[in-house]
Amino acid sequence: MGRSNQRYAVKFRRRRANITNYKKRLKLLQSKLPRLVIRKSDRQIIVQIVEFAEKGDKTMALASSSELKGLGWGFGLKSTPAAYLTGLLAARKAKEKKVAKAIADIGLYVPTKGAKVFAALKGAVDGGLQVPHNPDVLPSEERIAGRHMAEYLKKASITENFEQVKKKIVAK
């Protein structure tokens, strides 16, 4: 008969599946601020304001880039401008719920200068949320407005569409 090794502890399922980094999560929770959770899926960008609760985290505000279509956005939902607009929309919804401060949670994404998750962060900051961040990692205004895509797609209308949707979000 084999003896069990009592010194070995099986790691949490979400850690084994490489979904959650619990050390990073604990540091974020110790700030006692709501988290600005930014996630990318295969089709869209999702930005949430999440508050810790013992029985499970509580989502206070949620914005996804698929909501941009209802505001007149006619381009890709995973693009840098779409990420910025989604962050802006999430900040507006957070202000309605009386959330003024948050801490950024980009999950397991590798923080790369100018990444889409930082475009969403910039949108949230421009929307009025106070989020501690390093301005050096944010994408340039040219990328946020979609000028790089206008040259690539040969469609100058993307920057006009960006400004129209931005005005609609800010006006609400």
Image (cartoon, rainbow, N blue to C red):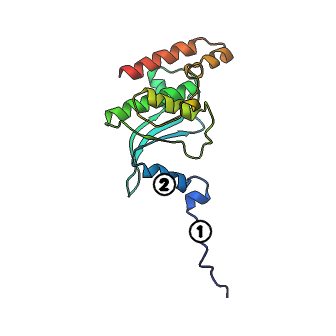
Sequence-wise first label, 1 or 2: 1
Q: Which residue does the image show at 54% across and 55% down from the upper left?
A: 23
Q: Which residue does the image show at 61% across and 56% down from the upper left?
A: 17
**Residue on which disc 2 sits:** 26
- Disc ID at residue 47: none
**What amino acid type should be assigned to the residue bearing mark 1?**
Val
Residue 118 x/y as whole percent? 55, 33
Q: Position of 87 compared to 58: left or right?
A: right
Residue 43 x/y as whole percent? 58, 35
Query: Which quadrant would the N terminus be assigned to in this image?
Result: bottom right
Query: In front of the other: label 1 or label 2?
Result: 2
Helix, strand or loop at label 1? It is loop
**What amino acid type should be assigned to the residue bearing mark 2?**
Leu
For the residue pair 101 and 109, the one nearer the viewer reads as 101
Q: Which residue does the image show at 48% across and 16% down from the upper left?
A: 163
Is 32 located above or below residue 83 in the figure?
A: below
Q: CA distance from mark 1 to mark 2?
A: 19 Å
**Residue on which disc 1 sits:** 10
